[in-house]
Image: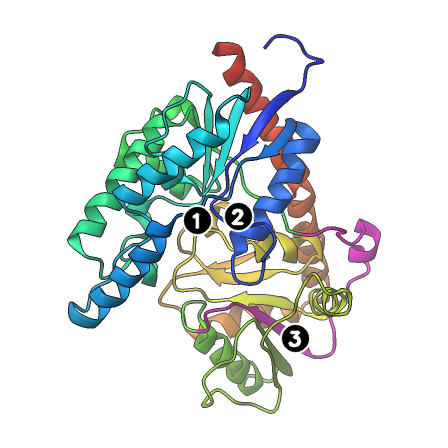
Amino acid sequence: MNDESKRIKIALLTAHTLQNRRRSSWSGTVAYMTQALQKHCGDVYLIGSVHSKKKLLGKVIHKGSQLFLKKNFAYNHSFPLAKEYAQIVTQRLAGQSFDLIVAPSCGTEIAHLETDIPIVLVEDATFALLHNYYPQYSNLLKKSIYETNALEGLAIKKASILLYTSEWAARSAIEDYYADAQKVYVVPFGANLDKPPSQEVVQTKRKSDQCRLLFIGVDWQRKGGEIAFETLLKLEEIGVQAELIVLGCTPPKKFSHERMTIIPFLNKNDERQHRELNRLFETSSFLILPTRSDCVPMVFGEAGAFGLPVVTTQTGGIPGIIREGENGFMLPLSARGADYAKVIAEVYRGDQRYAELVRSSRAAFDARLNWDAWGVSVKKIIKEMLIQE
């Protein structure tokens, strides 16, 4: 692999279909990741997603477990499923020659895979971090805890390169699963945007007469919607005219306000709705996300592209993306609406400070939160690994 002119062949194994992007953030992410790999790293050939009837059986077991045992079964991560995945992937690799397998969010898919092809596992967390942190990984059957943990360990051991989106996740791989630190890397994802606004356009962004808070999330409760609502009320109480745009979910009826707008969903694949989404990024004053649990919200990179400062929680992998005073602010998990309102009001009331925050938010996107930056970093990592093979 010393021929600089030779493009490597990359087999892309996915756990999610790339077509339906409505509910799976990973689906859209993998689509942009594929473009970055093709542009910077080599020729990409799709060998997934991988489907199995055992997953359907797992869903049935999950429903039964919830009904009778009041416990969750992690149907996406089981020994029988992992073994079938390995058989399917082996068949798809047969008779083909690849230099590399890239496996985003595919720990279970590669756990039992026997191959001489180096594997790059891309993840935003480990099971050790997600267990009892995300709702779907909480209150699990002991069997699920054991199998999911074991599969995570097997996948980490099997991978030649481990790419994580944050130090939080990378540290867990090393400390909780004894990963070789020499093969663990932190490379943040880019923003899932086809055409980011130009730097010149973003530099013209100015503070509006009314502080517009943009809240984006499918899960109102987990993303801290109640705290965002409290922030709106508190801003008005301290004399800052504000409004709240809720995008991606429908809050419970008790959360209602004359200056609160609810947009249940915008489809990026629809041109008109895509323009509306961009308009919200362009015209909002802050992205507010008081999330209760998160790995790395993709929306942070998108906000940065528009010079939109973020106000969020210091939890999960977020400290690796948001840098205090550069592209936003992080508050402790215990913070409520009054705390968020105080931070927002201090910045919003100063024209120069707000303008500087807009510029530095965009600079963070340009430097490290775009897919070209991801692709360049990953190319270097892959090249060094293949030279040593």
Q: Whole-Å distance between the Cαs marked 2 and 1?
A: 7 Å
The residue located at (21%, 72%) in the rendering is 67
The Cα–Cα distance between marks 2 and 3, rounded to whole angstroms, is 22 Å
As drawn, is 23 to the left or to the right of 79?
A: right
* Residue type at the position of mark 1: Gly
What stretch of residues is rendered in magenta? 193-220
Q: Is residue 327 visible?
A: no
CA neighbours of label 2 inside 10 A, class few (<14), some (14 to 19), many (20+):
many
**Front residue (pair 212, 70):** 70
Q: Position of residue 290 (x, y in %)?
A: 46, 67
* Above-or-below relation of 255 to 104: below
Q: Is residue 255 left or right of residue 269?
A: left
Q: Quadrant of residue 12?
A: top right
Q: Identify the residue under disc 1.
A: 317
Query: In terms of sequence position, does the residue under pointer 2 or pointer 3 come before the other?
Result: 3
Compared with 36, 77 (above or below) is below
Secondary structure beneath dot 1 equals loop
Describe residue 114's horizontal placement relative to residue 251 as left or right: left
Q: Which residue is mark 2?
A: 321
Q: Residue 13 location, x and y as percent?
A: 50, 37
Pointer 3: what residue?
212
The foreground one among 10 and 381 is 10
Looking at this view, name the residue that lies furthest to the top: 2
Q: Are marks 2 and 1 in contact (CB under 8 Å)?
A: yes
Q: Crowding near pointer 1: few (<14 within 10 Å), some, many (20+)?
A: many
Q: What kind of secondary structure does the magenta stretch mostly adopt?
A: loop
Residue neighbourhood size for the residue with mark 3, other residues' Cα within 10 Å, grouped as few (<14), some (14–19), many (≥20): many
Give the numbered dot on residue 354. Answer: none
Q: Secondary structure at mark 2?
A: loop
Q: Nearer the viewer, residue 231 or 33?
A: 33
